[in-house]
Amino acid sequence: MRNLIFSLALLLGNLTFLSAQDIYLPVSSKSETAKTEYFKALQAAESINIPAFFDGMKAAVKTDPNFFMAYVNLAFAETAFGQYEKAAAYIKPALAIDPAGFNENERIHRKALQAWDKDPKADPAEYMEALTAAYPNTAEAFDLAGRSAKWLSKDPQAALKHLLRLVELRPDFGGGYNSLGYTYMELGEMDKAKAAFEKYIALAPAEPNAYDSMADYFMAKKEYAKSVEYYDKAAAMGMGSAMERADQARAAMKGNVAVVDGLYQAFAKGDVPAVLAVMDANIVWNEAENFPYADKNPYIGPEAVLNGVFARIGAEWEYFNLTDIQLHDMSGNMVLATLRYQAKHKTTGKVIDSQTAHLWTLREGKITAFQQFTDTKQAAEAVK
């Protein structure tokens, strides 16, 4: 599922239906029936069943019209989705509840609702800081503060601080690592993001969202083949929305293949400028070891490739054709081309017909790396 929806689910409350004081923030409702509905709603959020979440919270306030935290969850949810008018429909009755019997958690949240009542886009950061200060050893406080910082305050550094404390308090909480992973991604710390998602999968191997999140990571890295692998796994485990994103990743993979295919077509036409145009400014190009043009490996940048490889081929070979080209999607945002070199050397008159492979690495439609594999013995014999 998209990280926004999952993080919203986490923002709405803790995911594990436990009653330990050091996990949950206290609620003041006296209705056991209403509290049952409330926790069922949180469990629905855990499984990304947003309609069931709303139904459960609405059932809780129907059973107990003074269930303040149920209104808070509904208001937070609509605010996170940018549905400010709908949020107001829950803020008004929440603020109408007599706060005389409220606990500290509810008093802090009431201040946040008062701020939203005046300005739907008010930043709740100060209230989340107050919440974590009031409940320094309660996991839910940092859970809420982390998601609030990320999605409402748009402050990934604050989110990171709260989420690190969350996983310190609850090291077995997969959802915490999930949100931590997305926060690291936003901060550009991709290695840490991957480690967090791996931890999520290890803690929740039966949760399809764990694989969906890892797929999002690979999608962000533009490693489309790996992204497809994880989206497909999430879809196979019942997350229907992952199917669409798997198709998007497959389309992106085809985009990489199209770039490489276009390069070969341009090369066949002798359109060298078009070939160079799809290369990244810092492309790293390596000829196969012992190939005649491996003497200056690696070639850095399109101009180096042009002068060190293409110009020498044009000057030294009567023809140099690439035939039987087959393109294969690979992991790591790579495309593998299998082909043959069919060429005739100008000086010796010798020909080659050699089995060859090219491994291309791409990023955002540009080629960043090239590695050649071929029968170097044939080429060496031809140039003697």
Image (tube, rainbow, N blue to C red):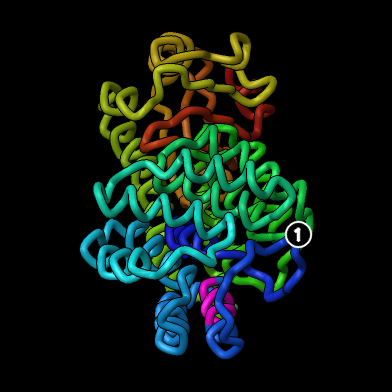
Front residue of 212 and 107: 107
- Residue 336 seen by the camera: no
Tell whether 171 sits left or right of 109: right
At 64% from the left and 29% from the top, the residue drawn is 378
Viewer-proximal residue among 302 and 149: 149
Q: Amino acid at mark 1?
A: Asp
Numbered range of the magenta stretch: 38-45
- Of 295 and 225, nearer the camera is 225
Image quadrant where residue 380 sits: top right
Q: Residue at x 46, y 60 (%)?
A: 8
Q: Secondary structure at mark 1?
A: loop
Residue located farthest toward the front when viewing the structure as drawn: 100
Determine which residue is flagged by label 1: 22
Image x and y of residue 384, in percent: 63, 14
279 relative to 54, above or below:
above
Residue 320, quarter of the rendered image: top left
Question: Where's residue 56, x and y in %?
Answer: 47, 83
Label 1 crowd (10 A; few <14 / some 14-19 / many >=20): some
- Whole-percent x, y for residue 170 in the image: 76, 55
Q: Locate residue 286, reporting x and y percent.
A: 58, 22
